[in-house]
Amino acid sequence: MLYEKVLDSLKTNPKITQQEISKLLNTSLRTVKRILARLQEENIVKREGSSRAGSWLVIGKKV
C-alpha cells in the first residue's frame, strides 16, 4: 500500500522532501501531502525542524 511505501521512504531518508517522495513513488504531490498529513494526525510521523531544513521522524506504526 502507498502508506507503507511513504513510511519506508521516510525511514530510509528522513530529510526527503514531499516532491522527492512523489517522484520516487510515481504518484502526485497532492497524494503525498494527503498521506503525510494523515500520518501526522495519527501520530505516526512528526516533522522536526523547519520546513526547509527539517527532517521526518517516524514515531509509531500504522496497524
Image (cartoon, grey):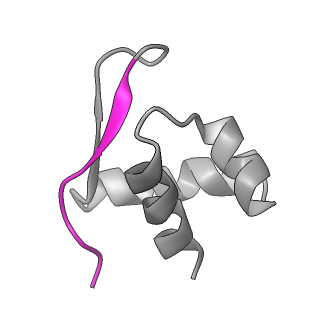
Write down the region rendered in magenta: 54-63
Residue 59 lies in the magenta-colored region = yes
Residue 7 locus on image (x, y percent): 43, 62
Name the residue located 40 percent from the left edge and 40 percent from the top edge.
14
Q: Give the image quarter of residue 17.
A: top right
Q: Main secondary structure of the magenta part?
A: loop
Left or right: 55, with 21 as reference point: left
- Residue nearest the viewer, comparing 46 with 9: 9
| Residue at 46%, 32% in the rendered image | 15
Rendering coords of residue 33 (x, y %): 58, 47
Side (left or right) of 59 relative to 5: left
Q: Is residue 62 magenta?
A: yes
Above or below, 52 against 13 in this view is above
Q: Quadrant of the C terminus?
A: bottom left
Residue appearing at x 41%, y 59% in the figure: 38
* Location of residue 31 with respect to 20 vertically, above or below: below
- Classify the position of the N terminus by image quarter: bottom right
Residue visible at 72% across and 61% down?
25
In x, y percent, where is residue 46?
27, 42
Looking at the image, residue 20 sits to the left or right of residue 36; the answer is: right
